[in-house]
Image (cartoon, rainbow, N blue to C red):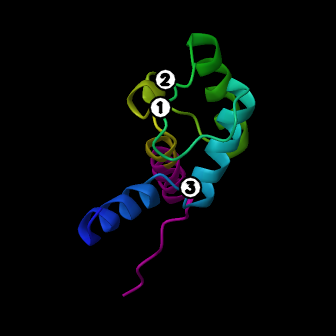
């Protein structure tokens, strides 16, 4: 293996690490619901054994743990830990922005 291949392998390995707190929470949740070892960032919910029942259980846990409501079918589109974590973070930002009081401009 030359230096370039080693760098590429290291980058690929890094891409599969759980980086954000949300990714870590999602991975722990999947591990509990699917009864599997902790998944990696790019692991796919369905490929790990997820089905309609575990999907509903996971959506319910996300609603409780993150205080957001995912739209129907969101988990089928965001099927990796990382993609789902990014979706959760985006939904939490939207929720925070919509509940923040509007600032008054008194010029």
Quarter of the image with the C terminus is bottom left
**Is-magenta flag for residue 81?**
no
What residue lies at 49% left-to-right and 21% top-to-bottom? Answer: 46
Magenta range is 86-107
* Residue farthest toward the bottom in the current orientation of the protein: 107
Is residue 67 visible to us here? no
Distance between the alpha carbons at the discs numbered 2 and 3: 18 Å
User: Left or right: where does residue 31 sit relative to residue 1?
Assistant: right
Tag 2 secondary structure: loop
Q: Position of residue 50 (x, y in %)?
A: 57, 19
Comes first in the chain, label 3 or label 1: 3
Quarter of the image with the N terminus is bottom left
Distance between the alpha carbons at the discs numbered 3 and 1: 14 Å
Q: Nearer the viewer, residue 105 or 12?
A: 12
User: Is residue 100 depicted above or below 105 in this figure?
Assistant: above
Q: Please tell me the numbered disc located at residue 44.
A: 1
State the predominant SS element of the stretch in magenta: helix
Q: Please tell me the numbered disc located at residue 47.
A: 2
Is residue 12 visible to us here? yes
Q: Nearer the viewer, residue 106 or 46?
A: 46
Distance between the alpha carbons at the discs numbered 1 and 2: 5 Å
**Is-magenta flag for residue 92?**
yes
Q: Position of residue 8 (x, y in %)?
A: 30, 62
Q: Which of 93 and 46 is in front in this view?
A: 46
User: Left or right: where does residue 57 sit relative to residue 93?
Assistant: right
Q: Please tell me the numbered disc located at residue 18.
A: 3
Q: Where is residue 55 in the image (x, y as percent from the top left)?
A: 59, 20
Q: Quadrant of residue 14?
A: bottom left
Q: Please tell me the numbered disc located at residue 91.
A: none
């Amino acid at each position: 293996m030359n230096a370039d291949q080693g760098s590429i392998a290291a980058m690929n390995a890094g891409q599969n690490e759980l980086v954000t707190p949300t990714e870590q929470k999602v991975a722990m949740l999947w591990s509990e619901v699917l009864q599997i070892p902790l998944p990696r960032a790019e692991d796919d919910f369905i490929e790990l054994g997820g089905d309609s029942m575990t999907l509903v259980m996971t959506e319910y846990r996300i609603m409780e743990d993150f205080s957001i409501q995912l739209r129907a079918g969101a988990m089928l589109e965001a099927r990796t830990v990382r993609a789902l974590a990014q979706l959760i973070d985006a939904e939490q930002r939207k929720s925070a922005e919509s509940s923040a009081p509007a600032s008054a401009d008194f010029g």
